[in-house]
Image (cartoon, rainbow, N blue to C red):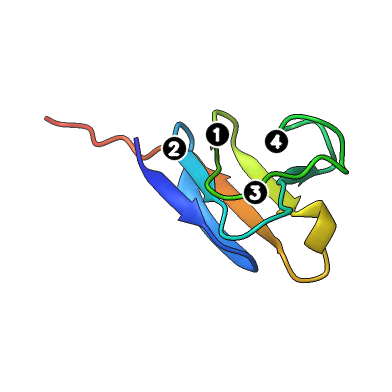
Amino acid sequence: MMKMMIRCLTDITIEEGDTVDWVWEGVGHNVKSIPRGTFGTAGDDSTAFNSPFTYSYTFMDIGIFDFECVPHSSIMYGTINCSCRRYIKYR
């Protein structure tokens, strides 16, 4: 399992089963999937958290997942591309 820390304006590629950590710096942040419901911090869009705070999510499905910090959505957003886990076959 790989863990990654996310900053704003991020496009990353991970493999299914990887965990992504969002680590807060400053005040008034959240993380929400676009569209809503796949992952995100607790509460509605107006619920925000201050540092020190970390949100983690393990991606178990393959796909493209957009996210944003709702209070700062014009500058804090990104995409996570989750691909199939690569297995090595030994002979």
Judged by depth in the image, the label closer to the viewer, 1 or 3, is 3
Q: CA distance from mark 2 to mark 3?
A: 25 Å
Q: Which residue is mark 4?
A: 41
Q: Nearer the viewer, residue 21 or 14?
A: 21
The secondary element bearing badge 4 is classed as loop
Residue 52 at x, y = what percent?
A: 52, 47
Disc 2 and disc 1: Cα gap in Å?
A: 6 Å
Disc 4 vs disc 3: Cβ atoms closer than 8 Å?
Answer: no
Q: Is residue 10 left or right of residue 38?
A: left
Give the residue pinned by disc 1.
Answer: 59
Callout 2 environment at 10 Å: few (<14), some (14 to 19), or many (20+)? some
Dot 3: what SS?
Answer: loop
Residue 50 tag number: 3
Label 2 amino acid?
Answer: Asp
Return the disc, 2 or 1, that comes first in the chain's sequence: 2
Q: Earlier in the sequence, mark 1 or mark 3?
A: 3
* Residue type marked 3: Asn
Q: Secondary structure at mark 2?
A: loop
> As shown in the figure, which amino acid type bears the numbered disc 4?
Thr
